[in-house]
């Protein structure tokens, strides 16, 4: 039985193709079941994200079967998504056996992602497996491979820093806030502007637990031009809206300011911050200036206990973190090697499972046959003696088969050994 | 033959090894380095306990007045405290900032001459109580010094607007500051207990409350400086960098008290162990 991975990703296919073949979350279980049914595979899992679509299939029959399966899947996808089969064949890749296992671990760990180490992919792979399992499209092979590969990916994320260093502007801002305040719960946030970027950072912060201002326990949203939108945003997070003129008086009660509005002059002056810090009694203030031109006067950075980061600073940190993540690729690949070898060994051991099962069945049938032949001699025995005979014959069969079974397990992957055992014991 | 000097040297080597491992952890954030640092330091503390116990057994008193005794006990208590905090709060960076101090103290203890049987032994039930409370307090101040340095490093990283990889190895500013303040508050209580039991001991043995020796005066001054940290925090809202520098200043006075004044003549000089 073999494992095959067929797919296309951001590395091989342009966005125009990827967006055509991408599947929504609700389509994935049905797709897994359909691929299994129509491709001739025994088991199937479909992983679909914005950057890749991959099918993990298991089937018996060697390379010829793999080729047939690949052709069937491409035709199926081409027909379902109205993309040329030739294009799909050109931009797709396939891995088999150990290469497929390695690829799955690398995908789940984020090593194959556009931003190395991105966090969502692990959950997406887990969900893809769960969806296929729920649709009845998986069996012991893919279940075993996916569970082990997911555990391996988790190990990579735990033992390396590949996914720990934030790599986007919003995640860097949240990480810096955590480096200053520790837990973000209970800290107050002022959002200046109602644009998408500010909203994204604020959402990450609120998601991280920061909410409410020091006085009224609400997130404050300041905007002059879009008061309605400011109110809507504030309402969404249980906060309050205010005008730009209200910022200086609100600052002393604020821990984190995210400023991202279009203005020609800074709207938060160093003097305002100085005055706020006088009232804050050494409580730190984190200022995130995402505006271009800048919203916060640069001089505020010189004040004690004030931490000011503008867009360039955050981008520099994010880029540096991407570089640092890449430095962890080599240690991560060493874990991939070790884990893939363990999974392949497990896969190999699956090959001898039918032989072991047949051997045990042979032993049990032989035992029953001998007992049946003994006929009356056994039936006439008292019940206790019959139980003893049952026990002794079972123990004898187990003892005789112990070494052949142990040997088969030790030689897992050795097809010749399995064949030899079949011949020696006359197994079909 | 197993001697206290040999055990002390082994403990010193363990502290040095622990320091190196924690430094590697700080630079690379490899968890294995932190675990190695913890094991080396824990082993050093265990060996150190044996060595110090042998010193005490040889002199039949707590060895605390000579440079070897003082540094050895302070290194031992500080290392044990640091390990306890590391284990409780899972702050592996503690080792990188506290173990170097422990290694220096251990080095001084190793270099100092072996203790001799004293002419007059300091004994009585109050004396061990005085020593343990004082040294636990001093260990708290020493550890707070390490955490304050960590705070300043982390603050520098965050202030720079282009933080290096060190930032990721260090805990949040707020966590480190809380830890420093907690250490100072606990150390203040313990040192106060040490000073009071010292006065009581002086009264019961020499008949005077205030021995008027430089070390006692410096210890009280030290306590006052550290006491200013929570007082200024509550009254003037001092925190962050100012608190860190106050704690570092207090530690400078601790070092002065024990490094410089231990060589000055005083009433206890004749009873040194």
Image (tube, helix red, strand yellow):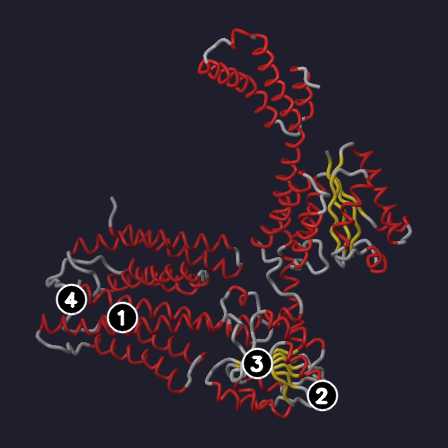
- Residue drawn at point x = 45 percent, y = 53 percent: B35
Of circles 2 and 3, the one toward us is 3
Q: Disc 2: which chain?
A: A
Rounded to the nearest whole Å, what is the CA distance between mark 2 and mark 4?
70 Å
Q: Nearer the viewer, residue A264 or B49?
A: A264
- Residue drawn at point x = 86 percent, y = 42 percent: A71
Of all residues shown, which one is farthest toward the left?
A: B207
**Which residue is under mark 1?**
B190
- The answer to whether A104 is drawn above or below residue A229 in the figure is above
Question: Would you identify the image quadrant in which residue A360 lies?
Answer: top right
Rounded to the nearest whole Å, what is the CA distance between mark 1 and mark 2?
56 Å
**Which residue is under mark 3?**
A218
Rounded to the nearest whole Å, what is the CA distance between mark 4 and mark 1?
14 Å
Is disc 3 in the same subunit as disc 4?
A: no
**Which residue is under mark 4?**
B126
Residue A117, given in percent of the width and then of the height, sits at 65, 58
Q: Disc 4: which chain?
A: B
Of circles 1 and 3, the one toward us is 3
Of circles 2 and 4, the one toward us is 2
């Amino acid at each position: 039985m073999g494992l095959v991975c067929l797919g296309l990703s951001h590395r091989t296919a342009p966005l125009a193709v990827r967006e055509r073949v991408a599947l929504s979350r609700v389509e994935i279980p049905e797709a897994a079941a359909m691929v299994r049914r129509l491709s001739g595979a025994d088991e199937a899992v479909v992983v679909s994200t914005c950057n890749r679509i991959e099918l993990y299939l298991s089937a018996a029959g060697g390379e010829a079967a793999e080729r047939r399966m690949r052709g069937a899947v491409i035709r199926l996808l081409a027909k379902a998504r109205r993309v040329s089969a030739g294009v799909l064949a050109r931009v797709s890749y396939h891995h088999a056996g150990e290469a497929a296992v390695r690829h799955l671990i690398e995908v789940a760990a984020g090593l194959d992602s556009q931003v190395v180490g991105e966090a969502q992919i692990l959950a997406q792979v887990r969900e893809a497996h769960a969806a296929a399992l729920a649709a009845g499209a998986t069996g012991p092979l893919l279940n075993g491979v996916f569970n082990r590969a997911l555990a391996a990916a988790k190990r990579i994320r735990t033992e390396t820093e590949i996914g720990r260093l934030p790599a986007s502007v919003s995640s860097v801002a949240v990480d810096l806030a955590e480096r200053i305040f520790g837990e973000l719960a209970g800290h107050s946030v002022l959002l200046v502007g109602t644009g998408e970027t500010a909203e994204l950072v604020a959402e990450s912060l609120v998601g991280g637990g920061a909410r409410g201002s020091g006085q009224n326990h609400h997130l404050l949203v300041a905007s002059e031009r879009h008061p309605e939108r400011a109110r809507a945003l504030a309402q969404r997070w249980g906060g309050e809206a205010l005008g730009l003129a209200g910022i200086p008086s609100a600052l002393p009660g604020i821990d984190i300011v995210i400023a991202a509005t279009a203005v020609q002059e800074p709207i938060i002056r160093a003097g305002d911050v100085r005055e706020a810090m006088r009232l804050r009694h050494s409580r730190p203030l984190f200022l995130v200036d995402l505006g271009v031109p800048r919203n916060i006067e640069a001089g505020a950075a010189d004040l004690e206990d004030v931490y000011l980061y503008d867009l360039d600073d955050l981008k520099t940190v994010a880029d540096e973190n991407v570089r640092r993540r890449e430095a962890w690729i080599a240690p991560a690949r060493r874990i991939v090697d070790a884990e893939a070898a363990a999974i392949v060994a497990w896969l190999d051991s699956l090959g001898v499972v039918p032989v072991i099962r047949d051997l045990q069945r042979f032993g049990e049938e032989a035992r029953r046959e001998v007992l049946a032949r003994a006929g009356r001699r056994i039936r006439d025995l008292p019940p206790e003696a019959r139980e003893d005979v049952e026990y002794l014959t079972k123990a004898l069969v187990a003892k005789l088969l112990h070494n052949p079974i142990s040997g088969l397990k030790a030689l897992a992957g050795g097809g010749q050994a399995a064949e030899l055992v079949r011949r020696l014991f006359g197994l079909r | 033959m197993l001697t206290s000097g040999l055990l002390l040297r082994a403990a010193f080597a363990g502290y040095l090894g622990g320091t190196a491992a924690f430094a590697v952890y700080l630079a690379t954030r490899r968890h294995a380095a932190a675990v190695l640092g913890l094991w080396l330091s824990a082993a050093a503390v265990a060996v150190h306990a044996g060595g110090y116990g042998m010193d005490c057994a040889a002199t039949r008193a707590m060895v605390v007045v000579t440079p070897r005794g003082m540094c050895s006990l302070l290194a031992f208590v500080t290392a044990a405290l640091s390990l306890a905090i590391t284990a409780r709060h899972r702050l592996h960076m503690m080792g990188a900032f506290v173990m170097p101090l422990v290694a220096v103290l251990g080095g001084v203890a190793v270099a100092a001459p072996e203790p001799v049987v004293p002419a007059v032994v300091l004994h009585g039930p109050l004396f061990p109580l005085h020593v343990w409370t004082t040294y636990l307090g001093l260990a708290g101040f020493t550890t707070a010094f390490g955490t304050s340095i960590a705070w300043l490093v982390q603050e520098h990283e965050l202030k720079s607007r282009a933080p290096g990889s060190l930032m990721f190895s260090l805990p949040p500013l707020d966590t480190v500051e809380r830890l420093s303040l907690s250490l100072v508050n606990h150390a203040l209580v313990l040192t106060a207990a040490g000073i009071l039991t010292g006065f009581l001991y002086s009264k019961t043995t020499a008949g005077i409350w205030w021995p008027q020796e430089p070390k006692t005066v410096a210890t009280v001054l030290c306590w006052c400086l550290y006491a200013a940290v929570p007082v200024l925090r509550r009254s003037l809202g001092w925190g962050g960098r100012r608190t860190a520098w106050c704690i570092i200043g207090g530690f400078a006075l601790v070092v002065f008290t024990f490094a410089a004044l231990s060589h000055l003549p005083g009433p206890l000089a004749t009873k040194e162990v």
